[in-house]
Image (cartoon, rainbow, N blue to C red):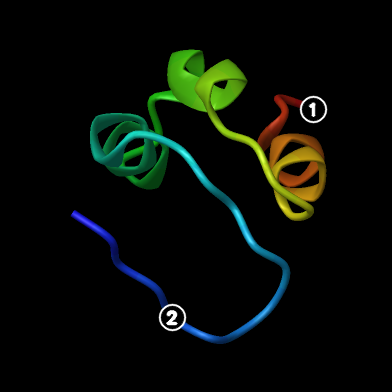
Amino acid sequence: MPWTVAAGPEIRGPIAALALVSAGRLAALPQLSGAGAAALTTRLAPA
């Protein structure tokens, strides 16, 4: 199911991976791609 929102760099991946990451389950980060995926991974990485 295509779904887009036009704000910021693109992050692509299976809807399940996007939902998991949105819920804080970082194990799904490797399933994401796109220009914003690396920045998202950096922002969510444990300190």
How many numbered discs sit on the rendered protein?
A: 2
- Residue at the location (52% across, 46% down)? 12
8 or 21: which is nearer to us? 8
In this view, the residue in front, 45 or 3, is 3
On-image quarter of the N terminus: bottom left
Residue type at mark 2: give it.
Val
Residue at point 72% right, 29% down?
Answer: 45
Left or right position of 47 against 4: right
Q: Residue at x 81, y 48 (%)?
A: 39
Numbered disc 1: secondary structure: loop
Q: Which residue is mark 1?
A: 47
Q: Quadrant of the C terminus?
A: top right
- Farthest left residue? 1
Find residue 17 and report its image quarter: top left
Q: Residue at x 69, y 77 (%)?
A: 8
- Look at label 1 and name its amino acid: Ala
Which dot, 2 or 1, sits closer to the camera? 2
Residue situated furthest front in the rendering: 2
Residue 41, given in percent of the width and then of the height, sits at 72, 35
Q: 46 or 33: which is nearer to us?
A: 33
Which numbered tag is attached to residue 13? none
Q: Which residue is mark 2?
A: 5
CA–CA distance in space, label 2 to label 1? 29 Å
Spot occupied by residue 15 in the image (x, y as percentages of width and height): 27, 41
Dot 1 crowding, Cα within 10 Å, few <14, some 14–19, many 20+ = few
Earlier along the polypeptide chain: callout 2 or callout 1?
2
Element carrying mark 2: loop
